[in-house]
Amino acid sequence: MSRIVVRDLTKVYGDLEVLSPLSIDITEGSFVSIIGPSGCGKTTLMRIVAGLEPATSGVVEVGGGAPAEARRQKRVAMVPQAPGLLPWRTVEANARLLLDVHRAANPTDAADPVDLLREVGLGDFLDAYPHELSGGMQQRVALVRALALHAPVVVMDEPVAAHDEITRAEMRLLLARLVEGRGATVLFITHSIPEAVALSDRVLVSSSRPGRIVADIDVDLPRPRPADVEDDPAFIALCGQVRHALHGGRS
Ligand SMILES: Nc1ncnc2c1ncn2[C@@H]1O[C@H](COP(=O)(O)OP(=O)(O)OP(=O)(O)O)[C@@H](O)[C@H]1O
Ligand SMILES: [Mg+2]
């Protein structure tokens, strides 16, 4: 129902080869991170899986069908790299945006954005406008906007980027809480090795452009993971494994 299959995917923009034949298979209900150098094609891959960008060649299936179809049926939701809130809409109205678009296609179990906003600590800011929020708060609104759809597939493009360590740690716990137990299939992009390991069932490491998967690392740490999981020797060893793969085996 919500498996993501990518087979021999390529993407070129003019002369620029962004994704070389790339294959991934993400089983239903798993949380998989992709980590890779800037410009290796991560956002491009996300946009293709979310049905926002066509592939040049290869097969991409989201829940057994074409990504564009999954998108139209609100079976895939995307948290973009930049929050992209509409400045003239309040926090609550921004969080409702995807539900407002083509209401007829709303999933029957769509969540109430106000409940989710309260859950992410924005209950006092329902009527505020984006310019009145911090960057981290704006990212939480973008997260709620996507999660409110209750889509079985969620793709997140660095939803925790550009924050200090404390905010990152809080966001990580929040994400784990919001996503774990919902059964969603999540494809998650990050630059942070500890974040990838802390959240994921598997971490995929991409080469530099053109992007292809150079390592596929299983994270067999039990869930729910405690806040101090980073002190666990198994966690530290896994981070080392990802770092090694990311640096082409040179570290
Ligand atoms: N619409 C587009 N037209 C032309 N080139 C594009 C387009 N979108 C992305 N690219 C190019 O594709 C390459 C990969 O971009 P992409 O945004 O996917 O990288 P990324 O891995 O997400 O990088 P970052 O980690 O910095 O976010 C870049 O060289 C970029 O210039
Ligand atoms: Mg990107």
Image (cartoon, helix red, strand yellow):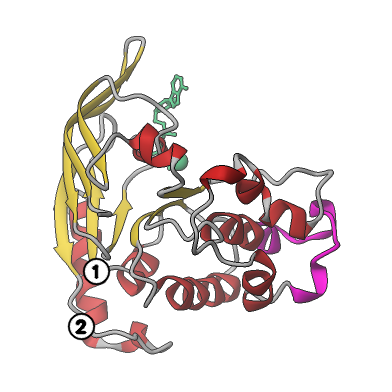
Q: Give the magenta range.
A: 123-138
* Res 104 → quadrant: top right
Residue at the extreme top = 14
Q: Is residue 54 magenta?
A: no
Horizontal side, residue 160 vs residue 218: left or right: right
Locate residue 223, reporting x and y percent: 29, 84
Amino acid carrying label 2: it is Ala
Quadrant holding ligand 2?
top left
Horizontal side, residue 167 vs residue 251: left or right: right
Residue 39 in view here: no
* Res 56 → quadrant: top left
> Which residue is denoted by mark 2 in the rendering?
234
> In the depicted view, which residue is nearer to us: 230 or 80?
80
> In the depicted view, which residue is nearer to us: 63 or 226?
63
Q: Secondary structure at mark 2?
A: helix
Residue at the image point whose x is 81% and y is 54% from the top: 90
Question: Is 34 rendered above or below residue 144?
Answer: above
Q: Magenta span: helix, strand or loop, mainly? A: helix
